[in-house]
Structures are given as C-alpha cells and as structure tokens.
C-alpha cells in the first residue's frame, strides 16, 4: 500500500518527500497497531481488519514528528499512538 508523497511541516513549512502510508488497526484496548503489508502480520490483525493508514514524518528543519493518520473505515478511530 505504501506510496511516495510530499509532506509540508505544519510547524515550519519545510517540505519532506517520503513513503507510506501504512495500514493499521485498533486492538480491543484501543491501541493502534501495524496491520502488515501485503498481508496481516497476526491473527488479531486479520480479525480486526484495517482501520486506516498512517505515516510518521520527522521534520529535520524544526525537529518535530507528525502523524498523517487517515481513517478509511466507519469504525471508530483509536487515539494516535
């Protein structure tokens, strides 16, 4: 699922080119966990299904980390990790 994309930092407007987004699911306790690609990495992941896509982007300019989490289902989103 991962593809290349451009991210512009919300803090300093610095542009970063990176790859991602990666599938995740929310476990029964509400924690966000990697789903796996191209196949689920666990039985739990397969049972829960994909809840959304996420990439963590680090900006070298301002030393901040941002999440670009995107929900893709109607399931309730778990809180950011």
Image: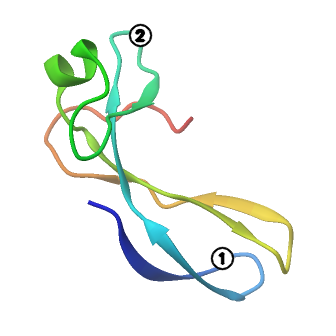
Q: Position of residue 51 (x, y in %)?
A: 25, 38
Pinpoint residue 10: horizontal percent, then vertical percent: 66, 76
- The residue under label 1 is 10
Label 2 packing within 10 angstroms: few (<14), some (14-19), many (20+): few
Q: Residue at x 66, y 78 (%)?
A: 9
From mark 2 to mark 1, how far is it between C-alphas?
A: 30 Å
- Asked which quadrant contains residue 11, the reply is bottom right
Left or right: 36 as drawn, with respect to 18: left
x and y, in percent, of residue 64 in the image: 79, 63
Instruction: State whether residue 72 is above or below residue 4.
Output: above
> Between disc 2 and disc 1, whose residue precedes?
1
Please determine whether, in this image, residue 6 is positioned above or below residue 36.
below
Nearer the observer, 7 or 2: 2
Quadrant for the C terminus, please: top right
Residue pictured at 38% horizontal, 61% vertical: 21
Q: Which residue is mark 2?
A: 29
Left or right, 20 with respect to 73, comes to right
Which residue of the protein is positioned furthest toward the right in this rendering? 62
């Amino acid at each position: 699922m991962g593809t290349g994309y451009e991210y512009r930092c919300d803090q300093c407007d610095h542009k970063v080119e990176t790859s991602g987004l990666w599938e995740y699911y929310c476990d029964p306790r509400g924690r966000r966990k990697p789903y796996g690609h191209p196949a689920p990495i666990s039985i739990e992941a397969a049972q829960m299904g994909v809840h959304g896509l996420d990439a963590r982007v680090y900006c070298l300019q301002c030393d901040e980390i941002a999440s670009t989490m995107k929900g893709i289902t109607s399931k309730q989103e778990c809180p950011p990790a």
